[in-house]
Image (cartoon, helix red, strand yellow):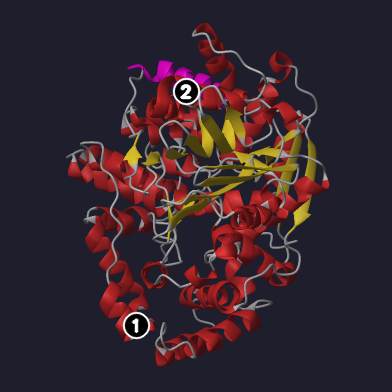
Amino acid sequence: MCGIAGILSLGAEEAPREDVLAMARRLRHRGPDGEGSYFGQGIGFGHTRLAIIDLSHASDQPFADEAAGLVLVFNGEIYNYVELRTELEGLGHRFRSQGDTEVLLRAFAQWRTGAFARLNGMFACAIWDERRQELVLARDRFGEKPLYLARTGREVLFASEMKAILAVRPELRVPNLRAVYRYIARGDLDQDTESFFAGIESLPAGHYLVLDREGRGTPRRYWLPRAAETPRRHAEAVEAFRSLFFDAVRIRLRSDVPVGSSLSGGIDSSSIVCTIHAQKLALGLGEQHTFSARFASAAHDEGRFIDLVARRCGADRHDTWVEPEAFEAAFAALQYHQEEPIASTSPFAQWMVMRLAREHGTTVLLDGQGADELLGGYTQALGMFFAHWLRTGRLDRAAGLLWESWRRYGSLREPALFGGYYLLPARVRDRLAERYFGSGALLAPAVHDRYAPAHAATIAPFRDRLRNELVRWQQTTQLPEFLRYADRNSMAFGREVRLPFLDHRLVEFCFGLPPQWLMEGATTKAILRRAMDGIVPDAVLKRRDKLAYAPPQRSWAHGPLKGWIVRHLEGAARRGDVFDGEAVQAVREGFLRGEDDVLAWRVASTEAWFAEMVDRAPGLPAGCE
């Protein structure tokens, strides 16, 4: 895991050396174990290293193969590097290191851009081809690792985080009001390649980009979600899912530094912890360490389930109590690292877990993110599947879902409300969301008139709409935001997060399953529950609640964080080029009366972003050195 940065100078003989080094310095938190740089004809690379696999200097970056004329900087992990190395050795390649960095470079030398589809991992990389005078950039299938670009006319800059680019090109610190509109109007973040800065974009997930010396090139997709062939018998499919999941966890345990797990007490993280325990003897693993966020609110705390899983697995458990006063104290540093608005207090819980892991010397944590988007785990999935059964004429299954929803949850609200929602086209849903909340009125008329509805399109690789909706969750509306939180929170403390549920083999397998094996009646994540039977404690597998690893947002907002929210609402009301002052004041007054905090939080968090990331002079806030 690392920080990467670089500049391609268009038509110039030299890249600005001091700028490249300054960009790398701004990424030291991502790589506290070492720094390196490379400068060639019109190109400069900077790198900061967090050593995880092959701790020796043999895997230091930038990594060069002078015979092939290739230089690599790389952020992430290639989990199948052992298997790829064996294959490449069979093709005549010789290695001078034991890490995955050299495997990636040799794979590119062998297969060029075809190498990226062979990788099982999370990565963002830059490769300079001296012979062809080309810069090749690539990003993993789901965008677990970030890669930002800025084109100034005379150069192309790239970096793991936007702050590295802004450190040397502060004139790019201009807000992207289209992104602001999307967040205020619908609560959408990280929807496509646009960032919250007008001049900075991200390389799309699952794409590579080849740039010539004039900066010309267009991103090209190397991976499209597909449905793998799956067993026709349910019992065999459950066994195949379990086998894939076990292997996804196994290869994510490859490390030369301590590996632990985030444990929320929910089924996703519990499945990972229990799967590690089930493979403990076969893999020769020692004592497992888990890291958990706890909350004083009994309605939000999952300590009972955390304790149940930790005891089952004999894990050495570590807890951190998440308090609202700590959120306000840490906010400047949290915002600095996140770089874009923070949609709730939930990311702060993860921030605290990563800090806890650093305190206990655990560098790598496995985490359950991605399971909800893969397996239809959110409550709105009830409506998504209900709409699917109606569209396909399976009224028996639609009725069964309603009955089970009433029996399990005592309510028909989710399948009925979200069923109607998912029967509508995505563009229509975007407009309805704005009308439902009345959120568009919070923006200055000029901003609203220019950008509404600012719909973000997504790919639709399947014939049936249900699977395309799951793809939309993974690629556009849900997962990208959570991946940003995970990457920045972990990297702020020099930690690495690995996500077994985003193993592309497992994702493609689930896309090949009949929908009723993902959602049995109104039971979400059905195949995971079946696969973990006897492995995860029954009390966890049979849970009906979903707490989403989140603090008590409403009580915090109307309690200890009330002053923080009101101050930022007042600041937003004065920012007339972005917000409609009267509409913001109306939200403020409603919030003070105890009304819903959703819109108040959106406006306050956006104003907080402006204050920290746009208005504030460039530099590091306290605690970010």
- The 10 Å Cα crowd at callout 1, few under 14, some 14 to 19, many 20 or more, is some
Residue shown at 55%/34% (left/top)?
Answer: 72
| Residue 593 seen from this side | no
| Residue 503 seen from this side | yes
Point out residue 325 in the picture as x, y percentages from the top left corner. Answer: 74, 71
Point out the image quarter for the N terminus.
top right
Which region shows up in magenta?
A: 231-248
Secondary element under disc 1, as helix, strand or loop, is: helix
Residue at the disc numbered 1: 441
Give the mark nearer the N terminus: 1 vs 2.
2
Question: Is 308 left, or right, of 347 in this rendering?
Answer: right
Secondary element under disc 2, as helix, strand or loop, is: helix
Mark 1–mark 2 distance (CA, rounded to whole Å): 54 Å
Residue shown at 66%/18% (left/top)?
Answer: 96
Magenta-span inclusion, residue 243: yes
Residue type of the residue flagged with mark 2 = Ala
Question: Is 117 left, or right, of 361 in this rendering?
Answer: left
In this orientation, which residue lies closer to the viewer: 455 or 91?
A: 91
Residue at the disc numbered 2: 109
Point out residue 332 in the picture as x, y percentages from the top left corner. Answer: 67, 70
Q: Which secondary structure class fits the magenta region best?
A: helix
Residue shown at 71%/59% (left/top)?
Answer: 295
Point out residue 164 in the picture as x, y percentages from the top left corner. Answer: 59, 58
In this orientation, which residue lies closer to the viewer: 283 or 597?
A: 283
Magenta-span inclusion, residue 251: no
